[in-house]
Image (cartoon, helix red, strand yellow):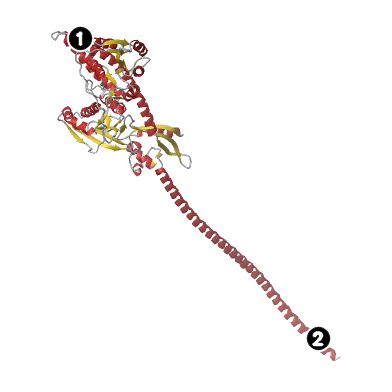
Amino acid sequence: MSRWPALAAFGGALAVAAGLVFVSLRRAWRRAAASLAESEALSRQLAVQADELRRRVEESEALRAELELSNIELVEASAEAHHARASAEAAARRKEEVLAILDTVLDSSPVAFALYDRGLRFIRINRAFAEVTGLAALDHIGATLDEVAPMIAPALVPSLQRVLKEDRPLRDVELSAPVSGPRLDSQAATRRYWLASFYPVRTARGGVLGVGALMLEDSERKNLEEQFRQAQKMEAVGRLAGGIAHDFNNLLTVMSSCSELLLRDLAQEDRRRNDVEEIRRAAQRAAGLTRQLLAFSRKQILQPTMVDLNAVVSEMERMLRRVLGEDIQLETVLDPELGFVRADPGQIEQVLMNLVVNARDAMPRGGRIVLRTRNVPRPSGEVLVALEVKDDGIGIASEALPYIFEPFYTTKEQGKGTGLGLSTVYGIVKQSGGDVEVETMPGAGATFRIVLPRYREALVARPVSPARGVSGRTSGTILLVEDEESVRSLAMRVLTREGYVVHSASRGDEAERIFTAHESQIALLVADMILPGLAGIELARRLRERRPALKVLLMSGYTDRDVGSVDRDVDAVGLLQKPFTPDMLLKRVAEQFAGTTNAQSARTG
């Protein structure tokens, strides 16, 4: 029994203790649970913070990666920029090099190049174009054609404007313009010629920036064509002049001879003598004109010898001073080493006189004329002899230059010139194997230069027996062949009155028949060089084959044949140039019968 209370008390105490423990445990659990809750909340908070931190770390890593990528891109961009800058600099250098090469090519090209803006102001030109205009290349930039090249502007501007207006190229345009300081070699033109092309120059967007022009010098071909045309024209005019002179010489022969015969028959006191004298003087003046025409046409008969031009100038100097008067100073500059020329001395004197008179007329207020002789070496190695006549007169207008050697062309007032002075010079020099050169500038004078082949020493001329004068009547039988009836009739009248027996014919074949019938009697053939059918030279050759001792006298109003070739065909030929007088005819006939000839050094061109 006693045990159970104790046990009960113990149990009670144990229950209390258990209760206390339970309470304590419950409190501890609650605290632990609260702590656990707090811990879980803290864990959750920490997890959230960790997530946030991780997110931020990830964002930081992403940002760092992005920054690294950006840095890489920046480095790459910098490298690319550096490369681009280097490429641009290299491209600029290449562009400069290409432009320099293009400049060199353009400046080395014979093709003139110019680039114009829309206002036709120069943007770029090359050296060839600068030479055309006469200015340095830099002087042209920004200037217009009218400002720097007024002489060629009229030729270029219309084509440039057309390209701008029509916006299309123009190709193979022929242009020409006068040159400054014109030079004329014989009949060469005084202009420069180009074959040009024009094209619009566009911007990158297709707009028209300006006009480009390419000009190829074509002057040599054009001038050669012009010289050829001029030579053809001069040849045609020469043939016309020679033909007219030939026909006129036949008429003048009759006029001169008939007036001479009339004067012989008229008494000194006869009043009709004055009229006849006027007819004779008029015929003589007309004969002078025909001689000038023949000189121009290069069909006159020359007697060339070796001539010293220094001697010609010196011998004529006093006479030239009288012709010039006191207002004009004459100066001579003679080359002591000058070579000889082969020419007719009388014709060379006429050339010099004509050139000096022409220079005098170009200086109405006086001035200075310089006569100069010199040897002129040519690139071919040939040496020519030159005679220059230089004046400081009014010069020659460019539009007149192509015509100054044409017969009857003159710029002088009416009545002050025939227009035959320079044409005579041209014909004589050409017939003598030379050329005429002219340099002139309007207002600054002119220089006429004749050039002839040079001979180192004078050749010894073949001696010619002095001509015997006509005295008393002479006998002999003559075969006269002349197609012009009036001349033939006149010559027969003169010769028969002098005592000759004359058989006449108008044609070569007719003359052969007469010669066959009277071969033993005929001692002299007097024939015109130009006959219908059989020419006089051929007739003489045929008759000489049949009778070598036959004497020959050829008459000519002009001749295309060189007398040297006449000498080769027929030896000892006498020449009688129309128009002739009775005394001249009788003198030549007497010379033939006496065995002398005047043709041994004669020459025609």
Can see residue 605? no
Q: Residue at x 23, y 22 (%)?
A: 417
Q: In the picture, which quadrant includes the N terminus? A: bottom right
Towards the viewer: 48 or 341: 341
Mark 1 lies on a secondary structure that is: helix
Can see residue 410? yes
Q: Is residue 49 above or below residue 316?
A: below
Q: Position of residue 479 (x, y in %)?
A: 30, 13
Q: Is residue 336 above or below residue 488?
A: below
State the mark number for residue 11.
Answer: 2
Question: Please, what is the three-letter code of the amino acid marked with disc 1?
Answer: Leu
Q: Quadrant of residue 386?
A: top left
Residue marked by disc 1: 262
Towards the viewer: 346 or 597: 597
What is the spatial separation of the Cα atoms under label 2 and label 1, in whole angstroms?
211 Å
Q: In the picture, which quadrant includes the C terminus? A: top left
Residue positioned most to the left: 269
